[in-house]
Image: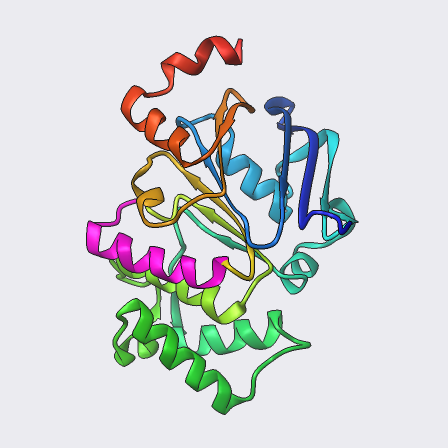
Amino acid sequence: MSSPLLKIENLHVEVDGTPIIKGLSLEINKGEVHAIMGRNGAGKSTLAYVLMGHPSYVISNGSIHYQGVPLEEMEVWERARAGMFLSFQYPQAVPGVQVGTFLRKSVQSVRADDAPSNKELRTQMKDAMELLGIDRSFLARYVNDGFSGGEKKRLEVMQLLLLKPHLAILDETDSGLDIDSLRTVAAGINSVAEDSGCLVITHYQRLLDYITPTTVHVMIDGTIVKVGGPELAQEVESRGYDWLQPEAA
């Protein structure tokens, strides 16, 4: 039996000596979509940053294995080249760097062993823009400079489509999106979910109307207190999180 794509066991994480994640376990296999729901401060984004190797987040106990390899042995760039992708909740602007150049350099760097030719990349970029409803003029703009919330998220998902990761970590990709943008972004995510593992971090159930999760995890105060199927997301949407507080205790 093959090992899980991602396996987290009894993970504890601190920031400046303050415990944030307090005993979290999770497994993701290829083709699975796992959603983590929770209030602000539950530790959801902390998990995303730990997975990608942010230096401010210290693992004090537990383990993370990616494709059977201890994650702490991998540098950030090695994680990216090994097929890990993080979409940020608040993507940063990069004035002076054109989107087309940024995407081309990203693909060449991350997919070093599987980089497409320039012609193939142009075709892939064209297909991604059509799927996401992006005009070709988008490529000449500076990365996230003056972008609307929807444009930022479309660029994040376009990166996802071009980088073809094995594990996609999507940190509140639905934040600030109107319903049309939400549907478009979800279509992009669904197009890669079949061949990848996805960890979707969100406050609300609405994104999960368009991306059907394999498993839903509810996180409170640094730990997972409830696990279920898509129906759990609907229950949280209708009842909030208070009913789960005793389980956290």
**Left or right for 209, reference 121:** left
Name the quadrant containing residue 155: bottom left
Q: Position of residue 184 (x, y in %)?
A: 29, 60
**Which of 224/50 is in front?**
224
Residue ID at (68%, 37%):
8
Q: Position of residue 55 (x, y in %)?
A: 64, 43
Q: How is the image coloured?
A: rainbow
Which residue corresponds to the image point at 48% horizontal and 62% vertical from the top-left?
A: 192
At 25% across and 76% down in the image, what residue appears?
Answer: 135
Residue at the far bottom in the pictured view? 119
Image x and y of residue 22, in percent: 62, 22
Vertically, is 83 above or below 249?
below
- Whether residue 153 appears in this view of the structure is no
Number of numbered discs on residues: 0
Q: Name the spot of residue 242 as percent of width and height, x first.
A: 37, 14
Magenta span covers which residues? 175-193
In this picture, is 13 found above or below 161?
A: above
Q: Main secondary structure of the magenta part?
A: helix
Is residue 114 among the parts visible in the rendering? Answer: yes
Name the quadrant containing residue 100. Answer: bottom left
Vertical side of 88 occupied by 229: above or below: above
Question: Which image quadrant for residue 146?
Answer: bottom left
Residue 91 on the magenta segment: no
Q: In the image shown, does 32 or 183 lie closer to the viewer?
A: 32
Asked if residue 177 lies in the magenta stretch, the reply is: yes
User: Would you place residue 59 above or below residue 79 in this image?
Assistant: above
Q: Nearer the viewer, residue 207 or 59?
A: 207
Q: In the shown orientation, is residue 147 left or right of residue 9?
A: left
Residue at 31% over, 67% down: 132
